[in-house]
Amino acid sequence: MKISWCCFGLLLMIVVFGCNHQQNQSHYLIIVGSNASTAEKLAASDLKADLEKVTDKPVTIIQENEKFTGESVNYVIGTPFSNSLITSLIDEKSIRLSEDFPGPRGGIWDKSQIDGVEVIVLAGSDIQGTQYAVYDYSHEVLGIDPFYYWTGKEPEKNRVDPLNFKERIITPPRVPILCYFENDVDELANLKEPLLEYDWESYTEMIDALVRIRYNAIHLFDMLGRPEFFIRPAYKAIRPDYDIDIDYIEKMIDYAHDKGMMVQIDMALGYKINPISEDKASCWSEYKDTWIATWNYYFEKTPLGKADIFALRPRNQVWDWEYKSSCDEDKVEVFNEVYEAFGKVIDRHNREAKKLVICYADGMEMFNNGFNPPKDFIIAWSDDGWAGFEYLPEDTKGYEFGTYMHAGFWLNHTVHDPYPEKIDSTMNMMFDRYQADRYCMVNGQQFRPFLLNLEALSEVSMAPDDYDGEKFYQNWTERYFDKSVANLAVQAMKLLHETQFDNKGYVEHLWEIREAISYLSNSPIERPGKTPVSYDYGRVENDLEHVKSRMVTISRALEIAGKGLNNVADQDTFYYDYVYLPILLYYDLLYFESILHKMALVKREFELTQKESLLEQARKLLADSRSQLDTLYKHRIDGDKNPKWETWYDPEKRRPNNGFPTTEMLNTIEEAMVTTWNSNQDKAND
């Protein structure tokens, strides 16, 4: 017993001494190598900023040849090739690290000593491995949220023990290229003037967050001047003078490179940079020289040539739809030729570049029916927009395979569809069945609403065998909320996912609302540049039952989300902004649609019976719809609690797909009640 108490006393002295030792360390030093890359230097700067969030002690970055002592907490960061202190530790066999161990994008956490002084080693086999060592440490040890800028989550101050971690080997990710696709970015690009363009703060903070969750490439698309921005009336109305700033594009590319990311460019031919006409984009055999000249122009006359990955979709090269030849070509034969020529252009300008085919539904069908690009192209197989696959390869044909996944989709653009569990089953199926693990591109839409799915796709791409969708869901919400509130958040978001069964999201309901208003106002749906859609009760009838079902589910989601809201502090804006508000907005829209459906049923009965009492019912429902539309607008304009995101949900700034209901539309219903509803009696009896 005496021996046991002595051992206990000795242990207590060691613990107390260790704690006092840490408390007596007066400052923090971050030691970088003389050959550190820009990305490593920025990682060091980020670690400095992270430490300053959790301690009041000074934090300084020094070079490897400067002195340091035990009076400071010392971090040594870098690679075996950039920091000689790391090289010395490897030579002394104090740490194990090389280009091959753990391997590309792998790293280590270690506690070691240099000349008797304790150091924390955050190092990688390469630059990205170093980044992951640093950013994982910031997240897991210092408590820094990788989405700090976007969520507003503050870490605890002066509660961190920098040595309270286990040494770790950071295994390289299963998927070597994880690429973020900036596409359909309107709300983020419209946050500040000029519209349809990222402000520098938003762009750099997005890149910074992506690097922290292990995305190592970005596909620039909207910011290159997508055709909609300067051709379609809805966009010309909000920015009639739209143009691109080529120097700003280069600045964006350079920043991504500085942060250690690759840059991917889809070499489509409709960008504002140097667009070709639609007639030339739909006839390769006649205009192939124009296509090739445009690719060469991108490489030789624009900063797009700085990219690391060059992609092309086997479809229309101006608009995002199927290739329909205007000169009677076979599209499979066309794109076999196109990719042969495209590959040669890439090789002529950058033999180190990676080449990519992004197959949408039409491209997937072509791939299964004779489309065979050169073998040095990676094939990226697209999901259905909702993390599922309707169409699968019959044979990978010896190609390196990857996936194109959606954290968000244009049909759920405003309100996310949270599905980390679906991501689990889908990605593991693609890995196991098709070895589709060489590449993954993730469509993040306007980024902020899709943080959950973005990180889930990163985690499964990192270590699919370890990823569990249910556990990820719980861990992610507990990062932000206490356990009881996190449970409510998960329940509410799962119901939000259930509300979107059969892959119907917020934006699709906007189209259904237009169908209902069209029928109620006896007027066709006008579509600029397309044939109007005639009004038809049958279209509304098709939506009645599923909207009723969705209303039941979204009402439960709102109730549960409200319980969580009652248990978070007023200053905790993230719960309201990320969990409660999206559900509220979806509820508002569905409730508005359900009122229109009730009105449509009354109109249909009126057409069949001509009962005057039905007109009065319809007028009351019209008044209800006006009131609900006011509520819908109020909640969207009031928007987030965090003032940083003021105007995010303003309908004037939203992506214009499928329109948006207005008071003027309801006025057309009121006019039709007086002027044309009676005239539909004969049509109803047919």
Image (tube, rainbow, N blue to C red):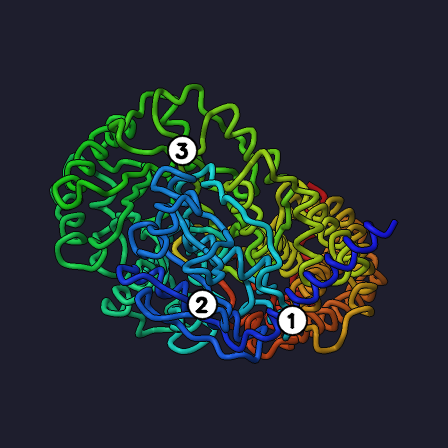
Judge left or right: residue 380 versus residue 557: left
Residue 304 appears left or right of 26? left
Task: Residue under label 1, please give it.
Answer: 20
Distance between the alpha carbons at the discs numbered 3 and 2: 43 Å
Q: Earlier in the sequence, mark 3 or mark 1?
A: 1
* Residue at x 55%, y 51% (from the top left corner): 455
Q: In front here: 651 or 592?
A: 651
Residue type at numbered disc 3? Asp
What residue is disc 3 on?
362
- The local crowd at label 3, few if under 14, some if 14 to 19, many if 20 or more residues have their Cα within 10 Å, is some
**Residue 671 visible in this rendered orientation of the protein:** no
Which residue ends up furthest to the front in the rendered image?
2
Q: Circle 2 sits on which residue?
A: 46
- Please give the name of the residue rendered at 46% of the width and 27% of the height, measured from the top-left corner: 435
The mark nearer the N terminus, 3 or 2, is 2
- Name the amino acid type tagged 2: Asp
Can you give x and y, in whole percent of width and height, for residue 62 in the image?
36, 71
Q: Amino acid at mark 1?
A: Asn
Q: Residue at x 40, y 45 (%)?
A: 105
Q: Quadrant of residue 292?
A: top left
Q: Nearer the viewer, mark 1 or mark 2?
A: 1
Q: Is there any visible trace of residue 294 in the rendered image?
A: yes
**The C terminus appears in which quarter of the rendering?**
top right
